[in-house]
Image (cartoon, helix red, strand yellow):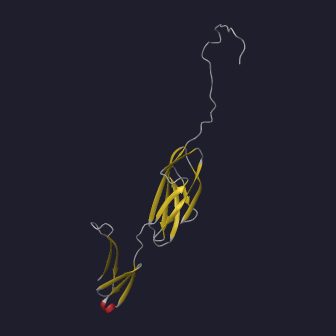
Amino acid sequence: AGVLVYDVTDKTSPALMRSYDTPGSPHSIAKAGDRLFVADYAAGLQVLGLPDITFPEVYITVPVALPSYETSDSTVTLGGGASDNSGELDRILWSNNRGGGDVATGTTDWLATDIPLHPGSNVLTVTAIDMAGNLATDQIAVSSIVPDTTPPVVSIAAPSPYDEFSVADTNVN
């Protein structure tokens, strides 16, 4: 005998989240917070813990709360917020699809500074992880536009150095 716990968020496709073996035959269940109280006939009252199945939330607000951003800098700072139904977040991670990643400072208010950018598009992903291991992500595409610092080259193709020509006015302003 035992108790089966289903996630019925999608009522058309319930998902088994956890099963508990109980010593007796459960006949009544009550839920309070993250606990199940099971009346288990001869075995008495069983108290079972429910797993945290709620995903945290994470969002990027720095440098902008938009899906994309352009900069001529070689690094960028990301910042934002995160929350979880339990009130406890384990950590916030960042990664760049072009390479690199680390742990941000803070959790509910977090900051990741001096993230290296590669020229072109960099998709930066921020991941919030709660104490139960549930994940949530947010992304921003940062385009690093490398400024053109090469001075122009000017060349005169005509007249050639061997052609003769005359100029009526010799004053150059």
Q: Position of residue 46 (x, y in %)?
A: 37, 86
Q: Residue furthest bottom?
A: 42
Quarter holding residue 34: bottom left
The quadrant of the rendering that contains the C terminus is top right
Q: Position of residue 85 (x, y in %)?
A: 45, 71
Compared to residue 54, the image places residue 123 above or below, namely above
Point 30% across, 85% down: residue: 28
Residue nearer the viewer, 43 or 63: 63
The quadrant of the rendering that contains the N terminus is bottom left
Can the viewer see residue 26 in this picture? no
Can the viewer see residue 152 in this picture? yes
Number of marks: 0
Compared to residue 60, the image places residue 48 above or below, namely below
Left or right of residue 125, residue 35 in this image: left
Residue nearer the viewer, 96 or 110: 110
Compared to residue 35, the image places residue 152 above or below, namely above
Q: Position of residue 7 (x, y in %)?
A: 33, 71
Point 32% across, 83% down: residue: 29
Point 55% across, 64% down: residue: 109
Compared to residue 49, the image places residue 111 above or below, namely above
